[in-house]
Image (cartoon, helix red, strand yellow):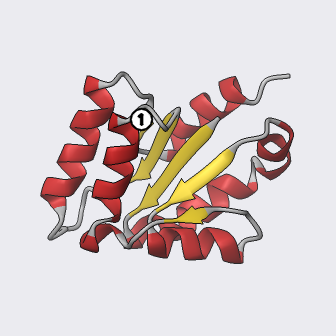
Amino acid sequence: MKIALIAHDGKKADMVHFLSGFKDRLHQADVDLVATGTTGAHIQKAGFEVQRMLSGPIGGDAQIAAMAAQKELDMVVFFRDPLDKHPHEPDVQMLMRICDVHNIPLATNPASADLMFRALTQT
């Protein structure tokens, strides 16, 4: 199972906090994590193993979308900041569209991610 993790700047701490609640379960479920560059750096500092792509604004969102289009991902978690402007919004929209086209589960906030992770890690 491979999960992509992305978070806008204002949501990176939320992503780390969220993942910390599932650390043991993710390890037991043998889940591989991939993230955009800066988000991945925060996740690594929290003690997770994660494959880091480019930073989102310089192509990381597109790299993850390409992985989704190639059916290399099982889930995408993208903690978006809907109250801030983002210069790479077209990339964000493209990623979300790719997830919809290829039927890849996409969580855009902690509540939906929590439901997906609980279902994923049920033993």
Residue positioned 46% across, 72% down in the render? 37
Q: Position of residue 77 (x, y in %)?
A: 48, 45
Of the residues shown, which amino acid type is indicated by label 1? Leu
Residue positioned 50% across, 60% down in the render? 35
Q: Position of residue 73 (x, y in %)?
A: 49, 37
Q: Residues within 10 Å of mark 1 (few under 14, many from 20)?
A: many
Occupied quadrant, residue 14: bottom right
Q: Nearer the viewer, residue 70 or 47?
A: 70
Q: Nearer the viewer, residue 116 or 103?
A: 103
Asked if residue 80 can be seen in this view, the reply is no
Q: Quadrant of the N terminus?
A: top right
Q: Nearer the viewer, residue 89 or 98?
A: 98
Residue positioned 73% across, 64% down in the render? 48
**Taking 100 as reference, is 86 left or right?**
left
Q: Quadrant of the C terminus?
A: top right
Q: Position of residue 115 (x, y in %)?
A: 59, 29
**Taking 88 as reference, is 32 left or right?**
right
Residue positioned 26% across, 74% down in the render? 58
Name the residue carrying label 1. 106
**Taking 8 as reference, is 48 left or right?**
right
| In the depicted structure, whether residue 69 falls above or below residue 100 | below
**Taking 57 as reference, is 22 left or right?**
right
